[in-house]
Amino acid sequence: MSKNKDVEKISVGGQALIEGIMMQGPKGAAMSVRLPDGGIDTEKLEVKHLRDKFKPAGWPIIRGVVNMIESLLFGYKCMEKSALKAGIDDDTDPENMSKLDKWLSDHFGPKMMAVITGVAMVLGVLLAFLLFTYLPTIIVDVVDKYLFKNVLANFHPLFEGLMRMVIFVIYIWLVAKMPDIKRVFMYHGAEHKSIFCYEAGLPLTVENVRKQKRFHPRCGTSFIFVILIISILISSILVVAFPGIDSNRLVWMAVKLLILPLTVGIGYEFIKYAGKHDNILVRVLSAPGLWMQRITTQEPTDDIIEVGIESIKAVLFDECCEDENSVNPEEEN
């Protein structure tokens, strides 16, 4: 079957989970998870969008921020659910619980997981701020002061942004060394390959999916790099427009947090544009993210590809068990 040029009219996206994949498409959202007994469990998911109730949430720029928040919350819930289905949390049995887990269970009861989740989210946000906002600023200041004698002061946003990228790459590279995360990255690869197979207008079979590339321009990894690049541009414009705004580092970090929604909104619009166009601007801004996907995606095994196929079938058809050989983007449009 030849490649369908109009397939971009139907957008399919997803997220790698613990032993599974979540997909969103024309038939809603669904997640497929490889169960401990070897079977694949596919579940349709209900997705609620703020734009359906509040029209401005769907406006350009604003929709990028809203979509990111919704995706983070929904993705986290899917990740938790996939871990339960895959049997990752089987050690919650009283006989297998550690002393700390038993203490938490005795003192908090059913609320234990909510408390742990809340603490984890706070610590995660704090860690992200320290690593990607505070640390790059401090490193550039120290290097500039002791090595370049304040020569970099006028280009602080540029070098700060580059340092943030370096820290991000190192962080992801280290995380990718963890066996469990590496397997998630294999599911990430299967997600991309399954989407590419559908977009190419090919039947969703293991053989066809295996042949596809695993680097996709609409990936969240590319989105992050686009945000980093855009943040450099916006920060540089602010420094030129308001000289001295970056002289007080606490004020400067507060400014960067305030402009983050604008940065995310512009980045989202670019990713949508990149998914439908192929030109020099798209290729240049997408290049760092596509390169980074060499780390955040790994070649999946056939059993992982099977999960990807089941998840994408579930969001293309009313019945997820339809024959995958009938998948044709032209028929969907």
Image: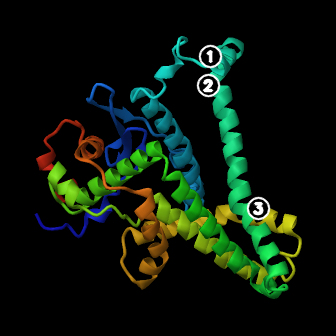
- Choose between 294 and 236: the one closer to the eye: 294
Q: Residue at x 86, y 64 (%)?
A: 250
Residue 262, horizontal then vertical, whole percent: 65, 66
The reply to whether the C-beta atoms of the residues labelled 1 and 2 are less than 8 Å apart is yes
Q: Earlier in the sequence, mark 1 or mark 3?
A: 1
Tell me the element at label 3. Answer: helix
- Residue type marked 1: Pro
The disc at residue 113 is: 2
The residue that disc 1 covers is 110
Tell me the element at label 2. Answer: helix
Q: Quadrant of the N terminus?
A: bottom left
Q: Which residue is drawn at 61% across and 69% down?
A: 166
Residue 291, horizontal then vertical, whole percent: 44, 70
Query: Closer to the camera: disc 1 or disc 3?
Result: 3
Q: Height in image: 290 above or below 171?
A: below
Residue 229, horizontal then vertical, whole percent: 59, 74
Is residue 211 shown left or right of residue 247? left
The residue that disc 3 covers is 134
